[in-house]
Image (cartoon, rainbow, N blue to C red):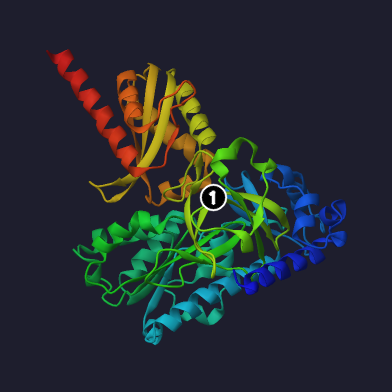
Amino acid sequence: MPASVETAQKKVLAYMLRKGAQTEYGKRYRFSKITGFDEYVRKVPMVTYEDIEPYIERLKKGEQYLLWPNKIQNFAVSAGTTGKGKHIPLSEDRLRSDQRFMRKVIISYIKQNPNFLHFFMGSHVSLPGNIERLDSKSNIRLGEISAYLAKLSPGWLSLFQVRSPQTMIREEWTEKFDRTLERAVHSDVRKIVAIPSWALRFFQRALEITGKKHIRDIWPNLRLLICGGEALNTYRPHFNQLLEGLDMDYIENYGASESYFAFSDDLNRTDLRLIIDNGVFYEWIPNPKEHKDNLQGQKTIPTWQVEKGTPYSLVVTSNSGLFRYMINDVIEFSDVEQPRIHVVGRVSEIFDRFGEAIESYEAQNALDTAARQTDSKFSVFAMGGLIDPDIGAPRHYWFIQWVKEPENMEEFTRLLDDSLRKINRHYHNRRESMGIHPPVILNLTKDAMYQWREKHQSLHAQTKMPRILDDEEKTIDMIAICRKAAADTHKKSVS
């Protein structure tokens, strides 16, 4: 790997240690005495959110210089509902890094598209999240990272927006979505920035309210879709169908509340360019799923030592005051000379196909609540999701083995949906916008479960039924098996 990658990353790490040395955390681990990567990983522990949550709670109460030497009043919500879940501190340095990242995205696209002025002759649509105060007496603000970026966007950019991002970040999702769509269908839209599930819903609703058959009949000059937060490839076939006849370009960003990491800088490739010089130092844990029960005890390597094709778990040090912070994603490098990556999954059981980031324990809690409210009992469950071919939109499927079925399955489904919306902010937002449609519950009989496991698992004494089905083919097969089992049971009861 060229020395430039090693040099750039070592420079980032030295900067982080220099700034962090001024903080309580940096003094605890004597950052000022650390001279390089090997010493850094030896003296500073890898952490999860739970490890640093006490510092974050103190920051929200007004204390400063705990993790980063800036006054921190903004926090990005990465999971859970507002006021709960993970709140990632947003320093001024971090927000400036995000702005630089977005400039890199736009500059990269301009270099590939000499007709970029085409975009400034029409309108742009963006669908950012929202920002709200922690409470009425506090100056602490919580919100999605997309909302903070919208707030920091240059004023002149609003001239091209269908609606002002500054206005939208204060609106509830349904209001924001409907008002933006109402104005967009009467505008010459040429660029859309949104997570894929919301963009899909935006296109579908545009066809519904206009009565048109094709998006090209509404926005004939639409050319660019910028996405992040979800895997673009999940939606690409549906976009290609909806946007048939348009010469579309797609840009995918890979980032999280913790930072932005990579983007598609080549329109002809599906892998992403890793940004190595913008406020993030990376470490990599090889083969993380083999060690997922003791990930914090594993050895990490720097970016200049990675190999192609090996799965890695990501650990970041960022200019928001996250030091050796573990990210749940699994990454593979497609190029190590000029670092390029694919995001290939998650370390722990989590469903994030449509940006909802549902942990298995959240699914369990939602089911427990619905079962308690309906006096029903279940034993085994699994959940997955796919884009329902009948409606062309994402939907979750829950496969439940009942001990005592609820008397009213429709009520149980509604209560499950409501419970998960209360637990998980991302799911709530996607359900609110109909980016994800109501869930479907299927009966998982013992025979159906065994048939599926025999086909898809190497069955051993310790093999467990997965709670999260993150593979579309496995989900489709489970749906087919459960529906066939239900049909067979119905035939027997009739005969």
Q: For residue 53, which quarter of the picture?
A: top right
**Relative to 438, 92 lies left or right:** right
Q: For residue 21, which quarter of the picture?
A: bottom right
**Relative to 315, 362 lies left or right:** left
Q: Secondary structure at mark 1?
A: strand
Residues packed near mark 1 inside 10 Å, few (<14), some (14 to 19) or many (20 plus) = some
Considering every residue shown, the one lying at the far left of the view is 495
**Residue 209 makes an appearance in the image:** yes
Q: Nearer the viewer, residue 85 or 317?
A: 317
Q: Which residue is mark 1?
A: 329
Q: Nearer the viewer, residue 94 or 71?
A: 94
Q: Quadrant of the C terminus?
A: top left
Instruction: Please say if 417 is above or below 239.
Output: above
Residue at horizontal 61%, vertical 72%? Answer: 2
**Residue 395 makes an appearance in the image:** no
The amino acid sitting under disc 1 is: Asp
Residue at horizontal 51%, vertical 35%? Answer: 360
Q: Nearer the viewer, residue 15 or 130?
A: 15
Instruction: Please say if 79 is above or below 194.
Output: above
